[in-house]
């Protein structure tokens, strides 16, 4: 690629000083670290975070317990209803 550059432009391609290359590398690492930090922060505290997952699992358990309680209550109420109907003579 350097020979092509020399042929087209007539001068060798200038090389960056080593200090500038180190600066670019350091800047790239800082940007990558910031990006990784934002990503991890979003995983822990964002809309799709682990905290939200734990809350939803707890809510699911609570709702399942409520369903069981309501089923038991419903069974008792149905039993009472049918006993009342039987006492009134409406059921065969």
Image (cartoon, rainbow, N blue to C red):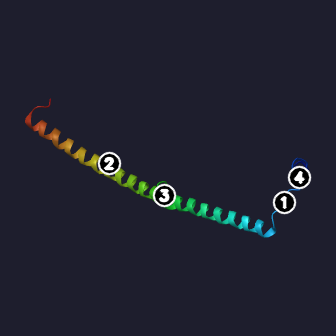
Task: Report, in whole angstroms, how far the alpha carbon at label 1 lies from the one at label 3.
Answer: 46 Å
> Alpha-carbon neighbours of circle 3 within 10 Å: few (<14), some, or many (≥20)?
few
Which numbered tag is attached to residue 2? 4
From this viewpoint, which residue is outermost toward the front? 10
- The residue at which mark 2 appears reads as 67
> Alpha-carbon neighbours of circle 2 within 10 Å: few (<14), some, or many (≥20)?
few
- The residue at which mark 1 appears reads as 14
Residue in the image at 35% along x and 55% along y = 62
Q: Nearer the viewer, residue 73 or 79?
A: 73
> Alpha-carbon neighbours of circle 1 within 10 Å: few (<14), some, or many (≥20)?
few
Name the side, left or right, on which 18 lies relative to 24.
Answer: right
From this viewpoint, which residue is outermost toward the bottom? 19
Residue in the image at 73% along x and 68% along y = 23
Quadrant hosting residue 55: bottom left
Where is residue 77? Give x, y as percent.
Answer: 20, 44
- Position of residue 8 relative to residue 54, above or below, is above
- The residue at which mark 3 appears reads as 46
Residue in the image at 9% along x and 33% along y = 89
């Amino acid at each position: 690629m350097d020979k092509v550059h020399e042929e087209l432009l007539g001068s060798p391609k200038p090389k960056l000083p080593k200090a500038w290359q180190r600066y670019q590398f350091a800047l790239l690492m800082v940007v990558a670290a910031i990006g990784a930090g934002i990503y991890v922060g979003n995983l822990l505290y964002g809309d799709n975070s682990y905290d939200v997952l734990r809350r939803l699992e707890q809510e699911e358990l609570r709702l399942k317990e409520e369903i069981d309680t309501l089923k038991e209550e419903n069974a008792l109420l149905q039993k009472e209803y049918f006993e009342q109907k039987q006492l009134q003579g409406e059921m065969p």
